Image (cartoon, helix red, strand yellow):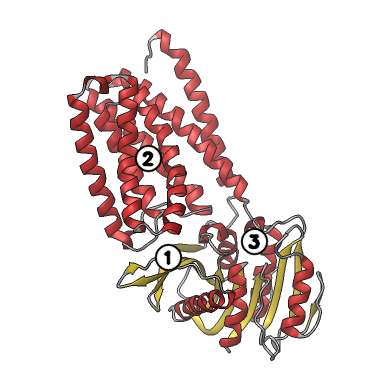
Amino acid sequence: MDFPDSNRHLAGVLLAVTLIGSIGWATPFVLWSDAGDSGYTVEQVYVRADDRITTATLYLPDGNERVPGVVFGAGSGTAPALYTNYGTALAMNGFAVLIAGQTRELEADRPIHWEIRRERSVLFERATRDYTNWVSYLGSHSRVEEGRLVLAGHSGGANSAYRVAYEQPDVDGVVAIAGRFPPARAEPFPTNLLLATGSEDSLVPPSTLTNVSVELTGTAVHPGERTGAFENGTATRVVVAEGATHLSESDNPRLVHATTDWALRSVGKSPPSNLGVRVRSIGSVLYQFLFGLVGVLTGTALTKQVVASQFDEQWRRETTVSFVWLAGFATVLHTTLSQRVYHLGPAPTQLTKYVLLATLLLVVGVALDRTASLTSWSNTSVGSSLFDLAFLFVPAGMFVVVSTQFVTFQLVTTIVLSSVALAVLTVFLGELAVLNVQRRSRWAAIGTAVLWVVPAIVPPYL
């Protein structure tokens, strides 16, 4: 392909940066090729019971045979994607795993007004009921062996696992990571118990777990110690991950391996000498995402350089540039943040949300386009930018308000998350404008990205 002499240097720079970004994004797939990205399937699911709905991720080992199950409760306010390392490790070692996230209450399939409950006992009661519903969901799955179940969780999820274990007589074991509020029960804990935390966890320091072991088993178990036996369901152990904080416990290798080992022993299996698990940190995923974004930015600009010399028709140039950007953005997002931090992808079961947002994007987009066509200042850089921002933020803002129904807590949380996503899209919208992609073409591309990302951020009601 031939570039004008004045553009060859720029094309070379764009190509070099695109390659650097692409290599930075792709390298983890090579380095972590044995990290467990095969041998199991992953599905985003919703668990509905008692007029409540939970967003969850289901991991199933390949094959058709029935396997033991693990229910893992995420920490309060976090997403199942944060615990991907646990789901991966357990699924690779033969478990069906349900990692459950936020649960919200429904009334006639609509969210009730947000309720702030200050009494800890009420919070524990509701959380325990939710966890019990998760156990029923996984226990009734066709791939899960009857009576072979391990309960696990982090922080708030661990507090619920303690309580449900007393109510489920067929539970084989419990893994409680940073669970500091055990129930007050007279009888000893009914099954094998792994207590774990990080050495730098200020909320649940190691000494707290020793106290928890006394409350639950009547015996003080110190970090590194193990008492009892798996055969009669009395095994108890305390594990401390050196250097881990409350937040980093979600991707700590020591805790992931200890959880997998304990689950296997609890269901009567001997753990292999090598569990075949490598743990990826959240930080590495963020770096991968940033490298990918850089590659998409420069790759889009490079595409514009290429198609300008290949296509005479403007619509073909703009369509190609928009498609390359959208495909690159969706690929990078889906393979990084959406997989490991927060699921940001289409949810077919929530069709109404997508219809609503698509309608808002279309109506607002048409209105803004007609207004821009009637105003001369819309052709200036400032005017064009204002119309671009209006198209990006107005439909998304209306969608967030309607979806959260002005419930303060949900509204604030969703606005923060949506603003971060829209800020990233603003960068790309600006790039498409600088590349002289016409308004309707760039709005179509950005609107598709908004439709891809934003509905995943709001509560799963509509």
Vertical comparison of 451 with 315: above or below: below
Vertical comparison of 441 with 220: above or below: above
Q: Which amino acid does label 3 sit on?
A: Gly
SS state under label 3: loop
Q: Where is residue 182 in the image (x, y as percent from the top left)?
A: 66, 78
Q: What residue type is labelled 2?
A: Ala
Of tags 2 and 3, which is closer to the observer? 2
Label placed on residue 267? none
Q: Earlier in the sequence, mark 2 or mark 3?
A: 3
Label 2 to label 3: alpha-carbon separation: 33 Å
- The answer to whether residue 178 of the structure is visible from this angle is yes
Pick whichever, 404 or 87, lies toward us. Answer: 404
Circle 2 is placed at which residue position? 327
Label 1 to label 3: alpha-carbon separation: 43 Å
Of tags 1 and 3, which is closer to the observer? 1
Quarter of image, res 90: bottom right
SS state under label 1: loop
Circle 1 is placed at which residue position? 114
Residue at x-position 69% and y-position 69%: 272
Q: Where is residue 215 in the image (x, y as percent from the top left)?
A: 74, 82
Mark 3 surroundings: few (<14), some (14-19) or many (≥20) residues within 10 A: few
Circle 3 is placed at which residue position? 276
Side of 287 where 108 appears, left or right: left
Q: Where is residue 10 in the image (x, y as percent from the top left)?
A: 46, 16
Vertical comparison of 441 with 210: above or below: above
Side of 341 where 207 appears, left or right: right
Q: What residue type is labelled 1?
A: Trp
